[in-house]
Image (cartoon, rainbow, N blue to C red):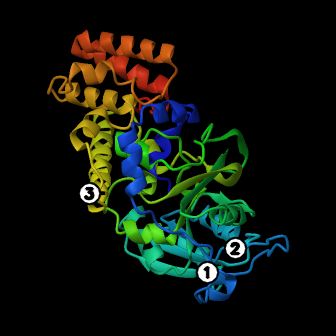
Amino acid sequence: MKGPSDRRNLSRHSALTQPMLEGVGSRDLDLAAQVTQVRVPCIPKATLRPSPFFSLGAANEETTHDAGLVSIIIANFNYEQYVGQAIESALSQTYPWVEVIVVDDGSTDHSLDEIRRFLPDVKLVQVEHQGQIAASTEGFRQSHGDFVIFLDADDILLPGAVDAFCKAFCSRENVVKVQGYMAVIDREGYSKGHRIPDVLPASGDYLALALRHGLLPLSIAYTSGNAWSRSFLEEVFPLPSSGWFDDYLHDLAPLYGWIESLSETVVQYRVHGKNYWYGSRALTRSAMRAHVETVNRGLDFLVEHMRKRGMPTRALQWRERKRSWGGVVVEFIVNRSIGRGRCIPWSVFILAPFGRGQEIFLKKLLLSSLLAIIWIMPTTPSMALAKLLLKKKGGWLPCPG
């Protein structure tokens, strides 16, 4: 199951990190330092919690660390042609202490027949169809691992992925998330010659930036390219029943600890034309309106967690500015398409490219000039130009037909 957060990485670069840091005041850093973070220890092998669904797979004698049990949770819905490869990749890890849990989300094809081929090496959980969030949550509830990977049923985990994740978790305290690169393949499994994202942000503590900006416009790995500490997931689950599963986790992670980015590729990410995000990223009024509503829902969840942890929030300002200038443009198009006018302060709209280090200065200036033109144009041409700008930015698709 692809999460719709596929949209974000096509235009963001880790170069934004330093300019964003330059905008963080001493008050933000002081607040960040006061927040208690989740402790994520490496667990000695002798203290592993028992699970009957271990896979010793292709144990690697070169594995010298014992980070603990790792749970690989595969949420599947009608991916009979791919789910077997995902399971095989999970069972073939070089790291020896792995449990594999497959949650079938009410599939109506022959997925169950494919999954049952791997019993009893995997645990099969069957639920009524409720979507990726509910299926992944049930998988987590039945897992035992100290670290958790949510593997999409159409992706392939590379053999050394879990080992690489575990080394990163053991490299320092308070690591709540480890992310690696994703090699893009087609429906037949052939390489498409590029990886996602172009550049991951530097490893670091992003709490001060989250306190300043709310939703961060950072490049991310999608669902399968991440591993999470159990202590972090226990803090943030349950997630809202609708929205973007991986975005909730990515946005909350800076509140709880260190984000580690790997230099290596950890997963093959399959693009086959039926990925969920394709339909959610068409430049139609319904898709863009749903996008705005989902972003706002994610922001509300982030603000809720911040307030629970005693952190200051700037909810109204963050809602206006979205995650990036692209989000502001989407809301502008939606407002004009339904006859609500602009409904965004002109200063927020025109200056949206500034303030977060998302682009180099000259590019910011050009984008700001284009947004000024869009602002003053009549409705129909302004919407056409705004959509063209989104397509150039990346992550959005032309209207079907």
CA separation in Å, label 3 and label 2: 40 Å
Residue 122 numbered mark, or none: 1
Q: Which residue is drawn at 70% across and 73% down?
A: 91
| Lower position in the chain sequence, tag 3 or tag 2 | 2
Residue type at mark 3 is Arg
Q: Residue at x 44, y 48 (%)?
A: 4
Other-residue count near label 3 (Cα within 10 Å), few / some / many at <14 / 14–19 / ≥20: few
Residue under label 3: 307
Judged from this view, the residue extending furthest toward the left is 340
x and y percentages locating residue 208 in the rendered image: 42, 45
Mark positioned earlier in the residue sequence (3 or 1): 1
Measured as percent of width and height from the top left, residue 288 is found at: 32, 36
Label 3, label 1: how far apart the Cα atoms are: 39 Å
Taking 344 as reference, is 11 left or right?
right
Tell me the kind of residue under disc 2: Leu
Query: 135 or 198, which lies in front?
Result: 198
Q: How far apart are marks 2 and 1 (CA)?
A: 8 Å
Q: Write down the residue under mark 2.
A: 91
Query: Which of marks 1 and 2 precedes in the sequence?
Result: 2
Q: Which amino acid does label 1 sit on?
A: Val
Q: Nearer the viewer, residue 229 or 367?
A: 229
- Tell which of 85 and 309 is nearer to you: 309
